[in-house]
Image: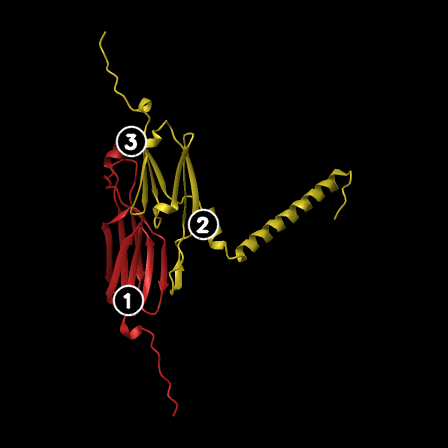
Amino acid sequence: MNTTNEMVQQPETISQDVRVAPPVDVYENADEILMLVDVPGVDDAGLSLRLEGGQLDLEARQVPLEHEGFQPVVFARSFTLPRSIDSDGVSAKLEQGVLSVRLRKSEAAKPRRIEIKTS
Amino acid sequence: MLSRWSNWGLYDFDRQFERTLADFDSVRREMNRLFDGNYRQSRAARSVGWPRIALFDQGANLVVRAELPGLNEKDVNLSIDQGVLTLRGERSAPPPEGYSVHRQERAHYRFARSFTLPCKVDVEKTKAALENGVLTVTLPKAPEEQPRQIAVRAS
């Protein structure tokens, strides 16, 4: 067995991101769906939210440290949204390492009170 | 209840029986805790590895980095006693007012982690900052522990 040769033949690998699924809370009220995601060590620049075809893709990249030995992670998770979400009404805010995403419901999906008339 | 006999076999059986009863008792206590509604908290308390913490030796400083999403300055308590650094805190994640809950993965955590520092540090100059949910503690090493260059001379 020639180990040296094997090592030479192996293709070089590019170090890949460590992807982690962050914990998420999902809440709902009459107007919106609220998602809270733990993404510590992520700044605005490292955050990407994409809404396409009823799917919300979240990617949050930790700010790397100059110190070696620390492996920054990428928080990544996808959600399938209900049809009732207004795709223009999505807003996000990052505070103390917690991302809050507000998904506004479309007007048609909001609960409505129907008057009952007695004849 | 069985009485204890001088016969060893029966004595063993007796002890075994008592142990089984004790097992039942611990199961019952666990069930009670489950139904007390404290389950969420107890599960969080039992899980290890929160917060995620890294320690570095940067030569002149020791650095502690802890990921504490959702914590304010007042939620974190940091102390140094006889070369042991202790980080305590609590993260509560109550559901917001007026919302119904679909999914709750962000647990309530109460944590305390202690680290024996590998060398003397200058406590007065120690700094701690909380940014983007990450606590960074910078502990400058004591003057006698600072890295030093030693000149090599040819004799």
Q: Amino acid at mark 1?
A: Arg
Q: Residue at x 25, y 20 (%)?
A: B149
Residue underneath mark 2: B44
Residue with the mark numbered 3? B58
Q: Residue drawn 28% across and 28% down? A: B60
Q: Residue at x 46, y 54 (%)?
A: B40
- The spot of residue A71 in percent (x, y) is 30, 40
Helix, strand, or loop for circle 3? Answer: loop
Q: CA distance from mark 2 to mark 3?
A: 33 Å
What colour has chain A? red
**B133 or A66: nearer the viewer:** B133
Q: Colour of chain B?
A: yellow
Q: Residue furthest top?
A: B155
Q: Residue visible at 31% across and 60% down?
A: A79
Q: Quadrant of the N terminus of chain A?
A: top left
Please say if the residues under marks 2 and 1 sit with CB atoms less than 8 Å apart: no
Looking at the picture, tell me which residue is in the foreground, B102 or A21. Answer: B102
Where does the image place residue A72, in percent across and percent down from the top left?
Answer: 29, 43
Q: Are marks 1 and 3 in contact (CB under 8 Å)?
A: no
What residue is pinned by disc 1? Answer: A104
- Name the chain under label 2: B
- Please, which chain is the residue tagged with disc 1 on? A
Residue B92 in the figure: left or right of residue B21:
left
Who is closer to the viewer here, A42 or B71? Answer: B71
Badge 2 density bin: few <14, some 14–19, many ≥20, Cα 10 Å: some
Q: Quadrant of residue B56?
A: top left
Instruction: Assign a secondary structure to mark 2.
Output: helix
| Residue A2 visible in image | no
